Image (spheres, grey):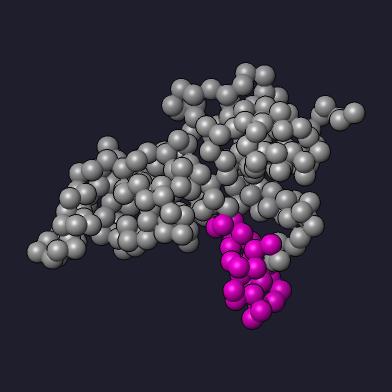
Amino acid sequence: MRNPNWTREQLILAFNLYCKIDFGKISKTNPQIIQLAELIGRTPSALGLKLSNLASFDPNLQARGIKGMQNAGKGDRLIFEEFQNNREALVFESENILADMQGLSLENKYQAELPDLSTMAGETRERYVKTRVNQNFFRQMILSNYHSKCAVTGIDMPALLIASHIIPWAENKEERLNPANGICLSALYDKAFDKHLISFDEDYRMILTTNLKEHCTKDYYQTHFGKMEGQEIILPSRGIPSMEFLGYHRVKCDL
């Protein structure tokens, strides 16, 4: 007989999956839910219910008037509070627990994302691993929120998509893993956004900067930028981009 009380590790792993799964696909038949349920010794139905419980504390859904299950427990609320207060620590802990339950080390699990590891040791190595693991989590979370589609073009090939930070990773530690600090963009628009050639206004419509408009006579300008000016981006199911963060980005663009 299963213990009705969820352990902290089980709850953290449920939260980890909650961040990576499309909210509309929370179901006991979802392969991701089935896989994690088996790993943590819970039924897919129980895990699906727990994900719905977590949704009731998601500020991104609350802002849109969407409610999860109403019988969520104190532990569900506390895990969201912990995420709000120290995202980096909780995310890295969750990835550590998940790798351990899968019988892997983080370095083995994420070796494809750790190409420079052989040249590092000690604290430098630990910091590098933590950064890359957390960045990988951010990517999965943002792509899930945007249904793996570019917010500008709708391109749905994950290999071409990037989880773009509105406030860069290096500039604000507290907001690095905030879902409201990310936009899913295909490579061209990610680069233009990162180089402050495009931004988005208070209505989530694309703005082109003066530096970009200097190229308005070029064919590529009209094809990839000119006809997109003023177009509203495809908004995510969760983690709608923060107006505060976009305002910061527009200032950087001198808009």
Query: Residue 87, image x and y in percent?
Result: 59, 47
Question: Does residue 164 sit above or below 71 in this rendering?
Answer: below
- Residue at x 65% of width, y 33% of height: 29
Residue 157 appears in which quarter of the rendering? Answer: bottom left
Reply yes or no: does residue 57 show up in magenta: no
Reply yes or no: does residue 124 show up in magenta: yes
- Residue at x 65% of width, y 41% of height: 31
Q: Residue furthest right?
A: 1
Residue 215 appears in which quarter of the rendering? Answer: bottom left
Which sits in the foreground, 117 or 147? 147
Query: Residue 152, image x and y in percent?
Result: 31, 48
Instruction: Answer with left or right where residue 40 lies relative to residue 139.
Output: right
Which sits in the foreground, 172 or 101? 101
Q: Main secondary structure of the magenta part?
A: helix
Q: Quadrant of the N terminus?
A: top right
- Asked if one can make out residue 22 in the rendered structure from this viewpoint, the answer is yes
Q: Residue furthest top?
A: 70
Instruction: Answer with left or right where residue 43 lies relative to residue 252.
Output: right
Give the number of callouts: 0
Q: Residue furthest bottom?
A: 119
- Asked if one can make out residue 76 in the rendered structure from this viewpoint, the answer is no
- Residue at x 82% of width, y 27% of height: 4
Which span of residues is magenta-colored?
109-136
Query: Residue 119, image x and y in percent?
Result: 64, 81
Which sits in the foreground, 125 or 229? 229
Instruction: Answer with left or right where residue 198 lies relative to residue 109.
Output: left
- Residue at x 81% of width, y 29% of height: 5
Query: Residue 88, image x and y in percent?
Result: 61, 52
